[in-house]
Each structure stands twice: as C-alpha cells, then as structure tokens.
Amino acid sequence: GALPLPSPNKMSKDSSIWEAKFEVLRINPEGKKFEKVSRIECNAKDYDMELKLDVHWKLFKCKPGEWIDFALASTIELNASRGREDNTYNQTERKTLMDDYDYVMHGRLFQIDQMKKPGVSIVYASFGGLMMSLKGNARNVPFLQPDMAIYALLKKAEAMELDD
C-alpha cells in the first residue's frame, strides 16, 4: 500500500508533503555528462510513478536494485506556528524535515505537462541546475503548482516487501 503521510507533528498546516518509496532502476542511462552529477531513474510501484533526478554523486550514491524514500515538500518547517518560509536562510539550530533525510535540494517547479493519457502528467523542477521529472497521476501530488519553490528530500530505504 501507499506510504502513510507524516504524523501531524511533522507537517505544518501551511505545508504539503508527498513521499513515496522508489526502486532505483538505472543510473546515467544516456551516459555520464558531468563529473559530479548522476541521473537516477526510479519507479514507485505503489503510485505507478517514474522519477528521473539529477543528484550530486559524491553526496548521494545509490545503485540499481536499491530503494530510496523520496519526498517533495513545500516547506522544511515542522511547526505550523513558524508560518511560511520567507526565502531567507535561518541559521538557528532547530529541527526541520531535513533531519529525517540524507540529501535535500531546494529548487523551483517550472513546468507541468498533461499527457494524452487521462490524469497523467509530468512535473519538471530544477534544483540549481539539477533536473527532476516526475511522471504519473497528478492527483498523487495535488499541491504542486507551476513556479512554486519546492524541496526534494531523499534517503536510502529498506527493500520494499512485494505483495504477490
């Protein structure tokens, strides 16, 4: 089944978060184009979604057959009383959603394409030039809007138990 949403204390009223477990299928299928960047291609069977994501390879390494927990979030704040982020770096040592992940990127969602198949779309984002495409049912991530600031969060995950 689908992964449960974070407990209420991990999600502010202002934020939206979506998380899924993805299996890494391929790394750099079109060849390695940059020394420190690799493109990972993954599939989330629970959501029938495909993810292509560029990562800094020295900071987050994975290989085909491994699983990652991948999340998209509109904020990293855990506390709704903090309000919306104002695009300034907060240097206080507070707990954030980032504490639960190994690799975090901040960027902008720049395009959502509707596919011919009903309900299927591709979401595109850029994280300082590292690109992401997420293809699948747009209802899985209804909070995503063009030109919104977004966080991508990743961590290694345990292998998923497949229901036969």
Image (cartoon, rainbow, N blue to C red):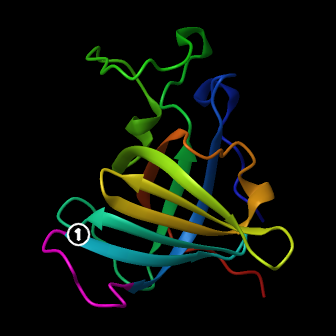
Position of residue 63 in the picture relative to residue 66 (left or right):
left
Q: Looking at the image, which residue is at 87% across and 73% down?
A: 118
Q: Position of residue 67 (x, y in %)?
A: 48, 72
Check the image and report above or below for 18 versus 36: above
Q: Residue at point 75% right, 48% down?
A: 142
Above or below, 72 relative to 132: above
Q: Position of residue 3 (x, y in %)?
A: 69, 56
Quarter of the image where the C terminus is located: bottom right
Q: Magenta segment, which residues? A: 27-36
Quadrant of res 106: top left
Q: Residue furthest right?
A: 118
Q: Nearer the viewer, residue 115 or 164?
A: 115
Q: Residue at x 23, y 84 (%)?
A: 32
Q: Could you tell whether 22 is left or right of 108 in the image?
A: right
User: What residue is shown at x 64% (from left), y 49% (from top)?
Assistant: 18
Q: Is residue 96 above or below residue 53?
A: above
Question: What x and y, as percent, mark residue 21?
Answer: 58, 65
Q: Is residue 30 magenta?
A: yes
Let me know if residue 31 is in the magenta part.
yes
Secondary structure character of the magenta stretch overall: loop
Q: Observer-nearest residue: 89 or 47?
A: 89
Residue on which disc 1 sits: 37
Can residue 8 be seen?
yes
Side of 19 where 59 appears, left or right = left
In this view, the residue in front, 127 or 48, is: 127
Q: Position of residue 82 (x, y in %)?
A: 53, 11
Helix, strand or loop status at disc 1: strand
Type of amino acid under label 1: Val
Q: Does residue 157 appear anywhere in the picture? A: no
